Amino acid sequence: MISTEWGAPKALIDGFKVEDIQAGLYGQCLHIWDWAKHTRVQTIDLGQEGAIPLEIRFLHEPSAAEGMVGCALNSSIFRFYKTE
């Protein structure tokens, strides 16, 4: 499973503020999880260009272990894929 760091709930209460990004209230990482063991196995830091990653989309091909994530702040899209 892959999850994103979207934003802390307290950052959403009063609406979006750019200052909250520098304060660390919005994320920029993807987390890869071992579903069976319920443990995180990897974190991918997308950097400033990857601030506020929202949705993860996988390819429609079931045998493909890759996808993309759209990031809201800079309208960036990152491709990810499985490695050894």
Image (cartoon, grey):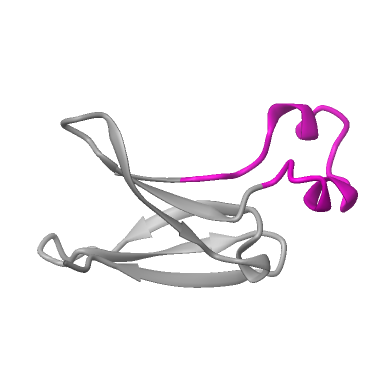
Image location of residue 63, percent across then percent down: 10, 64
Question: Residue at point 53% right, 54% down?
Answer: 29
- Decide if residue 22 is on the left or right side of residue 49: right
Residue at x-position 82% and y-position 53%:
22
Residue at the left extreme, as displayed = 63
Quarter the C terminus occupies: bottom left
Give 40 or 7, whichever is nearer the viewer.
Answer: 40
Q: Is residue 84 above or below residue 32?
A: below
Q: Position of residue 36 (x, y in %)?
A: 16, 31
Q: Nearer the viewer, residue 48 or 11?
A: 48
User: What x and y, as percent, mark residue 73?
Assistant: 72, 61
Please report the bounds of the magenta region as a residue range. 4-26
Classified by dominant secondary structure, the portion drawn in magenta counts as loop
- Asked if residue 74 lies left or right of residue 62, the reply is right
Image quadrant where one finds the N terminus: top left
Name the residue located 85 percent from the left edge and 37 percent from the top edge.
15
